[in-house]
Image (cartoon, rainbow, N blue to C red):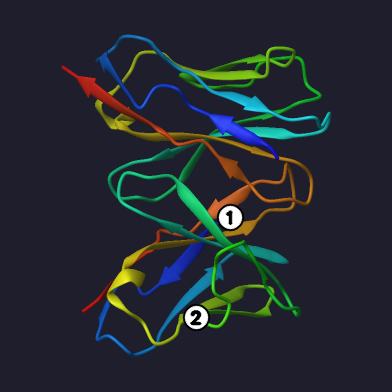
Amino acid sequence: GAVVSQHPSRVICKSGTSVKIECRSLDFQATTMFWYRQFPKKSLMLMATSNEGSKATYEQGVEKDKFLINHASLTLSTLTVTSAHPEDSSFYICSAEGTTYNEQFFGPGTRLTVL
Amino acid sequence: AQTVTQSQPEMSVQEAETVTLSCTYDTSESDYYLFWYKQPPSRQMILVIRQEAYKQQNATENRFSVNFQKAAKSFSLKISDSQLGDAAMYFCAYTIPASKLTFGTGTRLQVTL
């Protein structure tokens, strides 16, 4: 149980285009989901906390107009990178909060490359 | 602000041997949770073990165990009978109820034959 999927696993796009990444909790309902960014050989950096039915809470320094987060249902959160630039190239990971122990279950990640 | 410190950027262990990864944290909270996550080359984050701060007993999951020293704010991970599949980045993490995870900087574990 407690499986989180992410789609796509890899995406390559041109500079200036927008990319949407989906995060789904497959066998449980997640009121809260999180979006992280991870640079090579670095730790996870929290970008935002997504709560179902309400606006996301962004961490300091994260541009909310560039990284649009929508949590429309208890099993789906989306991250849209708008007007992507090469510096947005990174590994993006989502997680969903379980119902016990404040545990987070992580998706497999999405590698975004912006040309 | 809560911080999590992993002072060992890299560790190496021989197959079948035991290795301990260190983690310290700073908090003024009394109710919190600690975790060790493993990130293999696939980059999928996998929960290894969790510890509730109110529990005095150290958590154990098969070959993985922790040494939780609450007063010292220390939470080390011991891996016994190391296997090649244990090679990965290991992240220590902290959270309080209804809050976000705070991760350490990670320790890269190599397992040699």
| Quadrant housing residue B109 | top left
Q: Is residue B75 left or right of residue B52?
A: left
Please, what secondary structure does the residue beneath circle 1 have? Answer: loop
Judging depth in this view, the residue of A97 and B21 nearest the camera is B21
Image position of A84 with respect to A33: above or below:
below
Q: Is residue A30 visible?
A: no
Image position of A70 with respect to A29: above or below:
below
Q: Is residue B111 left or right of residue B34?
A: left
**Residue A12, disc:** none
Image position of B63 with respect to A21: above or below:
above
| Quadrant housing residue B41 | top left
Q: Split into 4 quadrants, where in the image is the N terminus of chain B?
A: top right
Residue plotted at (49% across, 19% down): B22
Both marks 1 and 2 on one chain: yes
Q: Residues within 10 Å of mark 2 (few under 14, many from 20)?
A: some
Q: Give, as a three-letter code, the residue at label 1.
A: Ala
Report how far apart the C-alphas of labels 1 and 2 lie in the structure: 30 Å
Place of residue A24 in the rendered image (x, y in percent of width and height, measured from the top left): 54, 71
Q: Give, as a three-letter code, the residue at label 2.
A: Lys
Place of residue B14 in the rendered image (x, y in percent of width and height, measured from the top left): 24, 13
Marked residue chain, label 1: A
Marked residue chain, label 2: A
| Quadrant housing residue B23 | top right
Please, what secondary structure does the residue beneath circle 2 have? Answer: loop
Q: Residues within 10 Å of mark 1 (few under 14, many from 20)?
A: some
The residue under label 2 is A66
Q: Is residue B20 visible?
A: yes
**Residue A2, disc:** 1
Place of residue A66 in the rendered image (x, y in percent of width and height, measured from the top left): 49, 80
Residue plotted at (25% across, 25% down): B110
Dot 1 or dot 2, earlier in sequence: 1
Q: Are marks 1 and 2 in contact (CB under 8 Å)?
A: no
